Image: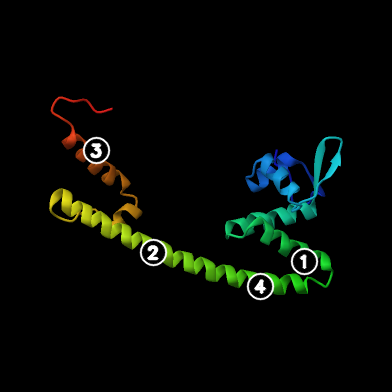
Amino acid sequence: MKIDLINQESFSISELSATFNLTSRALRFYETKKLIEPTRVGSRRIYSKRDKARLALVVQGKNVGFSLDEIKEMLDLYDIRDGQETQMKISSIKFRAQIVKLVEQKAQIEMAIAELTKLCDQVDVVVSGQPSDMKITEILNGKKVTLNAKIDALNTKSQPAGAETH
């Protein structure tokens, strides 16, 4: 039996955990950070549609690299009650700044990959006298098994005759 979470007015911690693929511990942590504010019935937490919507935005914000404080700042602007104009304007500025940050990180990652590729080639030349025939594109296209086989072959060569590998 599938639970209809779209038309529900309230949600349990297990329902939201399953919906967003989060642990209940994560939900409780978000509660301590005032990102969501469930009501309590005894020791049970009851989450509202608002909590669910905010949680969706928290997950989305985390996925694109925002800190919880940044996410909270953007979410809390909703409460200004100006038709979300301030929230949208500030969020747009923050989104664009995050794009710049991610583009810079991407450039740094690409430089690190290029540097590591050069180092691999240098090591291969020292070890075998020639660059490896294993290219980084092969690794990225799922040929990690071939790379592991080469590592195993190197380990076997470095073992003394008759020695067992573990």
Task: Determine the image quadrant of residue 153.
Answer: top left
Q: Earlier in the sequence, mark 3 or mark 1?
A: 1
From the viewer's perspective, is residue 1 above or below residue 164? below
**Which residue corresponds to mark 3?**
152
What distance separates the C-alpha of mark 3 from that of mark 4?
Answer: 51 Å
**Which residue corresponds to mark 2?**
110
Asked whether the beta carbons under mark 3 and mark 2 sit within 8 Å of each other, the answer is no
Give, as a three-letter code, the residue at label 4: Ser
**Which residue corresponds to mark 1?**
77
Whether residue 16 is visible, yes or no, is no
Label 2: how many Cα within 10 Å (few below 14, some 14–19, many 20+): few
Task: Determine the image quadrant of residue 2.
Answer: top right
From the viewer's perspective, is residue 135 above or below residue 87? above
Q: Nearer the viewer, residue 119 or 93?
A: 119
For label 1, the SS is helix
For label 3, the SS is helix
Q: Please state, as top left, top right, bottom left or bottom right, where the N terminus lies in the image.
A: top right
Residue name at image x 73 percent, y 51 percent = 33
From the viewer's perspective, is residue 76 above or below residue 147? below
User: What is the basis of the colouring in this image?
Assistant: rainbow
Task: State left or right for residue 57 relative to residue 85.
Answer: left
What distance separates the C-alpha of mark 4 from that of mark 2?
Answer: 27 Å
Residue name at image x 26 percent, y 54 percent = 120
What distance separates the C-alpha of mark 1 from that of mark 2?
Answer: 36 Å
What distance separates the C-alpha of mark 1 from that of mark 4?
Answer: 13 Å
Q: Nearer the viewer, residue 137 or 106?
A: 106
Give, as a three-letter code, the residue at label 3: Asp
For label 2, the SS is helix
Q: Percent x, y for residue 96? A: 59, 72
Q: Earlier in the sequence, mark 1 or mark 4?
A: 1
Q: Nearer the viewer, residue 104 or 53?
A: 104
Q: Earlier in the sequence, mark 4 or mark 2?
A: 4
